[in-house]
Amino acid sequence: MGMQIGSGGGSADPEVMIEMNMTPLIDVMLVLIIMLIITIPIQNHAVNLNMPQGPSNPPPTEPVVVNIDVDFDGTVSWNGVAVNPQELDVKLAAAAAQPDQPEIHLRPVAVVPYKSVAAVMAAAQRLNVTKIGMVGNEQFLK
């Protein structure tokens, strides 16, 4: 009376369960995580900087500016005072001899002949003036 009658054929064996046992896999993964945590070096969140210990440098001084104007007739003026070519050479040599050379700002008038400006620039180059620049070039764009 305890038998079932069915189409199974009368076999009393239970069905085979095909499932993977996850316990060993989880154990291996936990061991690997612990090994990884142990072997990672300790992170320092500090940034080491080599800061200067002495007093700071003094602020830079403003350079001395010398304005050389070249007028339409070739007249050269040094800071507003007209000079001849020999005086210009003496003043440029004195400026070049200084340890911290002054800035020479060369400002030609728009109608000045090129040879007058080129003569001043050649004298500056010959006397080793290194800080020279053209100022007021906007007037030549028109």
Image (cartoon, grey):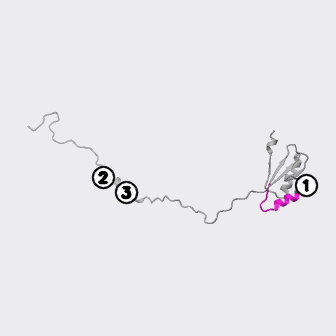
Marks 2/3: CA–CA distance = 16 Å
Query: What amino acid is at disc 3?
Result: Ile
Residue position marked by numbered label 3 in the rendering: 34
Label 1 vs 2, first from the N-terminus: 2
Q: Magenta region's main secondary structure?
A: helix
Residue 125 at x, y percent in the picture: 83, 55
In the image, residue 92 sits, relative to residue 19, either above or below, namely: below
Residue 116 at x, y percent in the picture: 89, 49
Residue position marked by numbered label 2 in the rendering: 24
**Residue at 30% across / 52% down in the picture?**
24
- Based on the picture, tell me whether residue 45 belongs to the magenta stretch: no
Helix or strand or loop: what does disc 3 sit on? helix
Query: What amino acid is at disc 2?
Result: Pro
Label 1 vs label 2, nearer the camera: 1
Residue 44 at x, y percent in the picture: 48, 59
Marks 1/2: CA–CA distance = 100 Å
Residue 43 versus residue 23: which sits nearer the camera? 43
Tell me if mark 3 has few (under 14), some (14-19) or many (20+) residues whose alpha carbon lies within 10 angstroms of its own: few
Helix or strand or loop: what does disc 2 sit on? helix
- Based on the picture, tell me whether residue 101 belongs to the magenta stretch: yes
In the image, residue 37 sits, relative to residue 111, either above or below, namely: below
Residue 130 at x, y percent in the picture: 79, 56
**Residue at 32% across / 54% down in the picture?**
27
Residue 128 versus residue 47: which sits nearer the camera? 47
* Relative to 28, 101 lies left or right: right
Q: Tell me the magenta residue range.
A: 89-103
**Residue at 88% across / 59% down in the picture?**
90
Which image quadrant is residue 83 in?
Answer: bottom right
Residue position marked by numbered label 1 in the rendering: 85
